[in-house]
């Protein structure tokens, strides 16, 4: 029996009686509203509106579904429309990169901002269909939706090359106190718990199972908050070495890449920022870090660049930089590259190299590249050729033997690349180039996801972006220091790290 005088009961009943297109619009809007819980906004309370409305819309859709096929289709439709709104408004910034050269690539804008979200929404449609199989009044339907979301978010992170960007769990972690539980649950299970908690207000619309469901949701919140509070109050792991890092954010304009003079200016800016005098009395940097792909030359073909770097570095300093590395040529002569991170010593000589193993489809490599190259779908790739993945993930080893776990660009959005892989390293290192997307939510979403990798692994994160977000994060996800977004500058920060003997490097597998 329902309480007809309850405003939420009346709202639930109203939503369930909407026509087909009215319902689709409501679901699309709810998905769009949910993106305000993501970075850079972090307005988590909107999820307590978006997810209950999704539940009520599914109540109405499934109430009129008499057969299994109808239930599956109705559940799929509800999930898909919600997901379509979520991914359109969460990923619209992908189109900004195409507009960097609108004359050539504007035609592809609908593919990036409509077609791609429509494909991703299929996963949330599958969650709706799976939940529909077990849908029943009361809290059990919330459990069904939560479990279904765990399953499809895992699939989204693994199917084909995987794309776990903006996993629903990120809506539940706006600050470090809410992040800590992900270390116990993992990202996808965390998302399931979040969906159950966010959906709990839907139980206020009727009496069945209300007390049990709400009590469980409150208990989960208390556990999450309590564990977060406990872990933030617990001392960091014992640090045996303090490394003085200088993080360099050049924030170079796009036009500089278009000419030889501009590229020389980029290199000159990197050297100048790296050589700036620090605060009076401050120790000189031990390690200088440049962003992903910011070096506008191939080190293998420019010994003069190595010489200039060696002359810039002071004795005992090391430089970590992201740069392309020639991997070879295809039979047609088209070049292929590794997206690599180098460690250079104070003579400009290579100490270690790590190559990117997980490339961005349509950004760093083109599926069916011979065909797509002919129609120009390379808007996100800087160099005139395809990238190839490194055979395996090598650790970066600094001249003093300290090891760092490399994450190049959007590799930081994949929990599976770090889970169980970081024990033999002292910290995470994420180099990225997000300038393609300007002042949009994209770079902030990227930073928020990299931040969670630090919490999951219990490792500090050193992150450098060409125009941001450049920051140092501790193993609890707290921001130690960061640079202003889209402004050139450097950040000198001492990072206390555990001393861990790095694994032996297999030189034969270096990129």
Image (tube, helix red, strand yellow):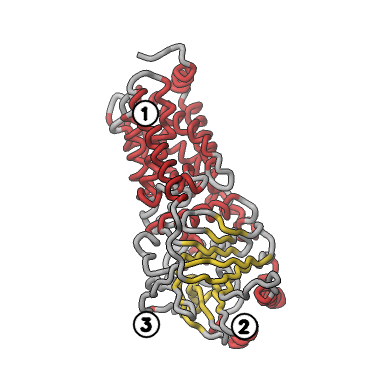
| Residue 361 shows in the view | no
CA distance separating discs 2 and 3: 30 Å
Where residue 335 sits in the image (x, y, percent)? Answer: 50, 77
Residue 508 circle label: 3
In the image, residue 213 above or below residue 261? above
CA distance separating discs 3 and 1: 57 Å
Assign a secondary structure to mark 3.
helix
Q: Is residue 29 left or right of residue 218?
A: right
Residue annotated with mark 2: 314
Q: Earlier in the sequence, mark 2 or mark 3?
A: 2
Image quadrant for the C terminus? bottom left
CA distance separating discs 2 and 1: 61 Å
Where residue 434 sits in the image (x, y, percent)? Answer: 58, 60
Q: Nearer the viewer, mark 2 or mark 3?
A: 2
In the image, residue 498 above or below residue 211? below
Residue farthest top in this picture: 5
Q: Nearer the viewer, residue 271 or 313?
A: 313
Residue at 44%, 18% (x, y): give it. Answer: 9
Where residue 13 sits in the image (x, y, percent)? Answer: 44, 18
In the image, residue 137 above or below residue 290? above
Total marks in image? 3
Residues marked 2 and 3 touching at CB (< 8 Å):
no
| Residue 203 shows in the view | yes
| Other-residue count near label 2 (Cα within 10 Å), few / some / many at <14 / 14–19 / ≥20 | some
Residue at 38%, 14% (x, y): give it. Answer: 2
| Other-residue count near label 1 (Cα within 10 Å), few / some / many at <14 / 14–19 / ≥20 | few
Q: Earlier in the sequence, mark 2 or mark 1?
A: 1
Residue 215 circle label: 1
Assign a secondary structure to mark 1.
helix
Residues marked 2 and 1 touching at CB (< 8 Å):
no
Assign a secondary structure to mark 2.
loop
Q: Nearer the viewer, mark 3 or mark 1?
A: 1
């Amino acid at each position: 029996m329902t309480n007809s005088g309850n405003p939420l009961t009346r709202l639930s009943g109203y939503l369930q009686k909407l026509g087909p297109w009215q319902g689709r619009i409501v679901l699309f809007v709810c998905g769009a509203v949910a993106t305000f819980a993501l970075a850079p906004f972090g307005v988590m309370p909107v999820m307590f509106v978006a997810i209950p409305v999704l539940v009520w819309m599914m109540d109405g859709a499934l109430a009129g579904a008499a057969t299994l096929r109808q239930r599956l289709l109705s559940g799929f439709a509800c999930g898909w429309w919600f997901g379509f709104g979520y991914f359109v408004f969460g990923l619209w910034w992908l189109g900004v990169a195409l507009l960097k050269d609108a004359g050539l690539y504007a035609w592809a804008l609908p593919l990036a901002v409509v077609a791609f979200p429509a494909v991703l929404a299929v996963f949330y449609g599958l969650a709706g269909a799976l939940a529909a199989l077990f849908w029943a009044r009361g809290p059990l339907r919330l459990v069904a939706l939560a479990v279904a979301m765990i399953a499809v978010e895992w699939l989204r992170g693994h199917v084909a090359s995987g794309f776990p960007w903006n996993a629903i769990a990120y809506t539940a972690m706006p600050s470090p106190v809410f992040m800590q539980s992900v270390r116990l649950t993992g990202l996808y299970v965390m998302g399931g718990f979040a969906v159950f908690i966010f959906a709990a207000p839907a139980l206020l619309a009727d009496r069945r199972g209300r007390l049990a469901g709400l009590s469980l949701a409150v208990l989960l919140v208390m556990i999450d908050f309590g564990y977060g509070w406990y872990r933030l109050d617990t001392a960091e792991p014992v640090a045996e070495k303090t490394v003085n890092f200088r993080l360099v954010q050049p924030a170079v304009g796009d036009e500089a890449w278009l000419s030889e003079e501009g590229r020389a200016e980029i290199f000159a800016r990197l050297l100048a920022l790296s050589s700036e005098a620090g605060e009076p009395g401050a120790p000189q940097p031990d390690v200088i870090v440049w962003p992903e792909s910011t070096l506008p030359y191939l080190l293998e073909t420019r010994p003069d660049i190595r010489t200039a770097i060696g002359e810039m570095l002071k004795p005992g300093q090391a430089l970590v930089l992201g740069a392309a590395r020639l991997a070879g040529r295809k039979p047609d002569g088209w070049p292929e590259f590794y997206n690599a991170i180098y460690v250079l010593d104070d003579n400009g000589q290579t100490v270690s190299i790590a190559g990117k193993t997980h490339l961005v489809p349509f950004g760093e490599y083109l599926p069916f590249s011979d065909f797509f190259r002919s129609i120009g779908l390379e808007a996100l790739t800087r160099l005139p050729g395809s990238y190839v993945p490194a055979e395996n993930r090598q650790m970066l080893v600094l001249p003093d033997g300290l090891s760092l776990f490399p994450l190049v660009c959007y590799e930081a959005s994949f929990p599976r690349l770090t889970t169980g892989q970081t024990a033999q390293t002292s910290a995470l290192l994420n180099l990225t180039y997000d300038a393609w997307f300007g002042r949009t939510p994209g770079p902030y979403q990227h930073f928020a996801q990299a931040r969670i990798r630090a919490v999951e692994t219990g490792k500090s994160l050193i992150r450098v972006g060409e125009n941001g977000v450049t920051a140092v994060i501790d193993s609890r996800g707290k921001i130690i220091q960061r640079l202003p977004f889209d402004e050139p500058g450097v950040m000198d920060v001492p990072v206390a790290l555990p001393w861990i003997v790095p694994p032996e490097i297999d030189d034969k597998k270096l990129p």
